[in-house]
Image (tube, rainbow, N blue to C red):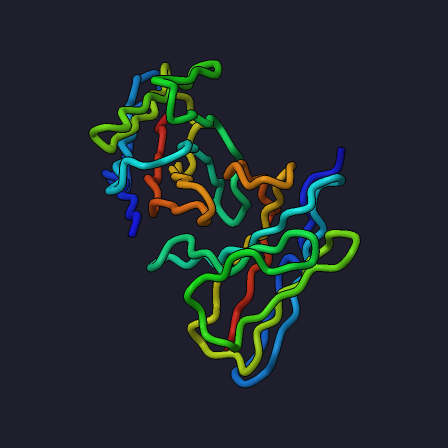
């Protein structure tokens, strides 16, 4: 059974810092991995999707990497801003089963 | 293009009552999934529908049910509500018939059970 873990559960950084969020999964037989952002009381917004054959994906200040063999992904946020404050969730897809989500990392960027 | 629409956004019920939540997927999306989100358990999969058929079901009691209509709109129902059913219920739709895991989420329905 696939399990997804995100560490740390919460993170607070000053504005302008570069930061890394971690995601690990137990079964490396995945099709893809996604990073989502969730603002309080809101739905999830997809940030990046990495196919199992890819090593990384970039969108603006965000860069996600995937090391399938070791069961790890990282989300790198450059030059963090207060508007980046949110909960970030990763989810893995393994085929005909539903996405499995981690519990998320709650990020606070302090101005 | 309109996103995934969920109604109602907020509702309060008492124990023992039942509730129906509605989800309209993005136009052209035929797959709809439902998730329950709570602070303790995170996001847990409820069920997925494609072309009016339940394709996957999560590990929830029979009090949780759903259906999908011919226009791809979906509803989920929870009967005999319990305090622990208080949660954010999220609906997500998928753009193509083969499930690639790419999901587009609505804003959710916040259910409070008193």
In this rendering, position of residue B33 left or right of residue A69: right
Percent coordinates x, y for residue A28 in the rendering: 27, 36
Percent coordinates x, y for residue B16 in the rendering: 54, 85
Percent coordinates x, y for residue A53 in the rendering: 38, 21
Considering only vertical position in the picture, is A52 above or below B66? above
Q: Which residue is rendered at x = 57% and y = 73% of the image?
A: B78
Q: How many marks?
A: 0
Q: Residue furthest bottom?
A: B16
Considering only vertical position in the picture, is A107 above or below A20? below
Q: Which residue is rendered at x = 30% and y = 17% of the image?
A: A18
Q: Residue furthest right?
A: B71
Q: Which residue is rendered at x = 57% and y = 52% of the image?
A: B33
Percent coordinates x, y for residue A30 in the rendering: 36, 36
Choose between B53 and A39: the one closer to the eye. B53
Which of the 4 quarters of the picture holds residue B60?
bottom left
Q: Which residue is rendered at x = 42% and y = 53% of the image?
A: B43
In this rendering, position of residue B35 left or right of residue A73: right
Considering only vertical position in the picture, is A43 above or below A78? below
Considering only vertical position in the picture, is A66 above or below A26? above
Quadrant location, the N terminus of chain B: top right
């Amino acid at each position: 059974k696939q399990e997804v873990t995100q560490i740390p559960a919460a993170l607070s950084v000053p504005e302008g810092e570069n930061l890394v969020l971690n995601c690990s999964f137990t079964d490396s037989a995945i099709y893809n991995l996604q990073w989502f952002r969730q603002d309080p009381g809101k739905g999830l917004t997809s940030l990046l999707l990495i196919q199992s054959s890819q090593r990384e994906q970039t969108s603006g200040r965000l860069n996600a990497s995937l090391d399938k063999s070791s069961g790890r992904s990282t989300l790198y946020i450059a030059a963090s801003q207060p508007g980046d404050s949110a909960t970030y969730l990763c989810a893995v897809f393994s085929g005909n089963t539903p996405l499995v989500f981690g519990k998320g990392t709650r990020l606070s960027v302090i101005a | 293009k309109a996103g995934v629409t969920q109604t109602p956004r907020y509702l309060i019920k008492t124990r023992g009552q039942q509730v129906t939540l509605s989800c309209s997927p993005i136009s052209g999306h035929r797959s709809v999934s439902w998730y329950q989100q709570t602070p303790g358990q995170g996001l847990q999969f409820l069920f997925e529908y494609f072309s009016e058929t339940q394709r996957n079901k999560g590990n929830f009691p029979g009090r949780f049910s759903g259906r999908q209509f011919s226009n791809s709109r979906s509803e989920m129902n929870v009967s005999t509500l319990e305090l622990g059913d208080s949660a954010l219920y999220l609906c997500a739709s998928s753009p193509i018939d083969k499930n690639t895991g790419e999901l587009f989420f609505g804003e959710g329905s916040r259910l409070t059970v008193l």
